[in-house]
Image (tube, rainbow, N blue to C red):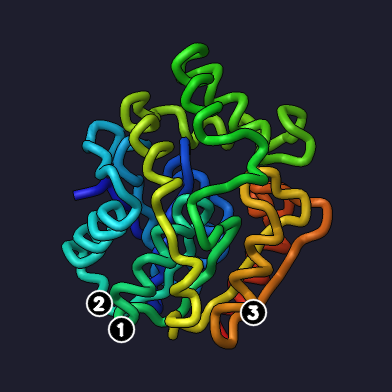
């Protein structure tokens, strides 16, 4: 079972983080939502307190591992917010187990794991991790999440959230992205969905969010100006209010 934390009382909300991170990355959002919701954060395999759990080789299997954890802690009907890799997992869950979800937020997500507009290819990331080691590699990845790179005041917070990332697990995650495809299944999503991104996202281009918004039935879209892949840390007040409003609608 994956490591998890739960705070607050009210309708259940599950937060799923992205690559080289952990549930800690959602600290500001958890603080904001826990007055009105029961907020559960998990650490995906290979990251945070789940760093020693073997990473399944596909996004589909990773989503099932998340669901096993969710069921073991008693969540029966919940809303889900996924960031980046977490958005892939959230989208996969919505397609496989739509009756479990109340609402879904796809943040910095994509409909296809092949990302030609990413700041670097996944194979380049694999090579950099091999050559530089985890510490330097993680710092370089985290810098790309922010419009101000390493000068953003929340850069060190993002690094801390991913401090326990497992190198072998990171390789498995990187190689699991390209084969994952949901583009042709977006029309099958029945969960009420909010698509969120920053207009300067260098990891998952805003065009991908716009595509998901167009193809997912009755989806909503919010694009934050002058924000990157870590919009929730660059502008936490705005991000938190947008998510809260959607969850309460």
Q: Does residue 92 appear in this view?
A: yes
What percent of the width, then of the height, locates residue 29? 56, 58
Residue 43 to residue 159: above or below: below
Q: Residue at x 49, y 75 (%)?
A: 186
Are dots 1 and 3 in contact, CB under 8 Å? no
Residue that label 3 marks = 220
Against 240, is 124 above or below?
above
Q: Which mark is residue 99?
A: 1
* Mark 1 or mark 2: whose residue is earlier in sequence: 2
- The residue lying toward the viewer, choosing from 33 and 56, is 56
Is 17 left or right of 78, judged from the image as shown?
Answer: right
- Does any portion of residue 247 appear in the rendered image? no
Residue denoted by label 2: 76
Q: Is residue 100 above or below residue 72?
A: below
**SS for callout 1:** helix
CA distance separating discs 2 and 3: 25 Å
**Left or right: where does residue 106 sit relative to residue 7?**
right
**Quarter where residue 221 is shown:** bottom right
Label 1 to label 2: alpha-carbon separation: 10 Å
**Nearer the viewer's eye, disc 1 or disc 2?**
1
């Amino acid at each position: 079972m994956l490591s998890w934390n739960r705070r607050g009382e009210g309708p259940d909300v599950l937060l799923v983080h992205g690559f080289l991170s952990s549930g800690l990355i959602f600290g500001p959002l958890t603080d904001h939502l826990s007055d009105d919701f029961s907020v559960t954060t998990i650490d995906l395999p290979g990251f945070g307190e789940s760093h020693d759990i073997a990473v399944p080789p596909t996004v589909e299997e990773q989503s099932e591992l998340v669901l096993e954890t969710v069921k073991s802690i008693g969540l029966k009907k919940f809303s889900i917010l996924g960031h980046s890799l977490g958005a892939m997992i959230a989208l996969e869950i919505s397609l496989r187990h739509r009756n479990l979800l109340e609402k879904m937020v796809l943040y910095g997500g994509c409909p296809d794991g092949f990302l030609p507009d990413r700041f670097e290819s996944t194979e380049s990331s694999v090579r950099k991790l091999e050559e530089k080691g985890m510490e330097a590699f993680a710092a370089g990845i985290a810098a790309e999440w922010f419009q101000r790179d390493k000068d953003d005041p929340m850069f060190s917070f993002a690094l801390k959230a991913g401090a326990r990332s497992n190198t072998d697990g990171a390789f498995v995650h990187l190689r699991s992205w390209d084969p994952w495809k949901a583009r042709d299944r977006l029309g099958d999503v029945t969960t009420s969905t909010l698509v969120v991104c920053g207009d300067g996202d260098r990891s998952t281009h805003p065009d991908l969010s716009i595509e998901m918004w167009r193809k997912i039935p009755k989806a909503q879209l919010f694009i934050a100006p002058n924000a990157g892949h870590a919009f929730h840390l660059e502008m936490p007040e705005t991000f938190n209010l947008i998510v809260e409003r959607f969850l309460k609608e």
